[in-house]
Image: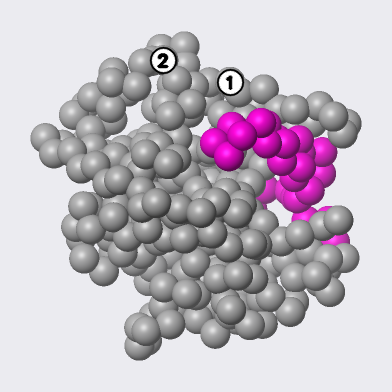
Amino acid sequence: SLSLGGILYSYAAMEHSMRKEKGDSFIGLSWKSLPDASILDPFLTSLRHLEPKPQFSTSHLTNRVRLIYASDSSRSEECSIILPPLTQREISQVDLRSLDGIFINMISGFDLMLETLEWMRANTSAHIHLDVHALVLGDISQRNGSARIPRGVDHWQRWLSCVDSIQLNELETQWFASPEITNENVLIDHVRLVRSKALVITRAERGASCYVLDKEYHTQAPSTSIIDTTGSGDVFGSVFLYRYLQSHDYESALSDAVEAASRNCEIKGVEGWLA
């Protein structure tokens, strides 16, 4: 059966985070599938802090992703249906200069082309946070039962140049800059010292780390009764960026993001955030 997932976890976490804030809102720069409207609309219309526009309507089906878990922290993904990438034509409907932050949270890895991100970077001073996850997953599945194989990201240096902070899990630190860099410590030093970017590594039940310039922060995850880990990275990234924009403090943003990701493991589905 189909269930809501992916970027909608980010929407749900943002809605939850903004409940006690006055005047804050967020914009969804993503497609809205018309064939899947009956599934999406009840959830989207319940988000009081989501701006009603833009709505990038499409006749394509929403991404279909099948997750196969070997354990709570180890899984493979199958993705045989994906939406077309957003282009400058759609994104230019929004005044990028008015945004405080932008969370690049791709589901297929082909949701946004590098050239489009470079155009966005040239037209905004917003803090751009990139979740690397789908970028390293390689080609989409050609059929059900075909898991995606991790690979290095083409032009990873250019991706890095466009963002202010970057989020990876421990496996992704080995793949993002491969074959040039496959060691976590070398990647950390390159990102924070050579590129002067903040690098965030999520470590599942061991919490997360943030490295920026000459500083590093580590946050332990609270004890959690795991029900479902799906969407935890999506939740982590959105809360990390939102809290950083509020405080300009990476340490507190990291702590809040770990707490939110841990909470996500204790609820079932995106709807659990809005209960």
Q: Position of residue 187 (x, y in %)?
A: 32, 23
Q: Amino acid at mark 2?
A: Thr
**For the point 71% across and 61% down, which residue is it?**
4
**For the point 72% across and 36% down, which residue is it?**
68
Few, some or many residues within 10 Å of mark 2 (<14, 14–19, 20+): some
**Residue 139 drawn above or below residue 88:** above
**For the point 27% across and 46% down, which residue is it?**
219
Total numbered circles: 2
Q: Earlier in the sequence, mark 2 or mark 1?
A: 1
**Residue 203 drawn above or below residue 59:** above
The residue that mark 2 highlights is: 182
**Magenta-span inclusion, residue 106:** no
Q: Secondary structure at mark 1?
A: loop
Is any atom of residue 148 visible in this view?
A: yes
Most foreground residue, 96 or 214: 214
Is any atom of residue 94 visible in this view?
A: no
Most foreground residue, 186 or 118: 186
Most foreground residue, 95 or 201: 201
**For the point 26% across and 69% down, which residue is it?**
246
The N terminus, quarter of image:
bottom right
The residue that mark 1 highlights is: 151
Region rendered in magenta: 59-87
Relative to residue 46, is residue 160 drawn left or right?
Answer: left
Few, some or many residues within 10 Å of mark 1 (<14, 14–19, 20+): some
Q: Position of residue 248 (x, y in %)?
A: 20, 60
Which residue is outermost to the left?
A: 214
Most foreground residue, 197 or 257: 257
Q: Amino acid at mark 1?
A: Arg
Q: Secondary structure at mark 2?
A: loop
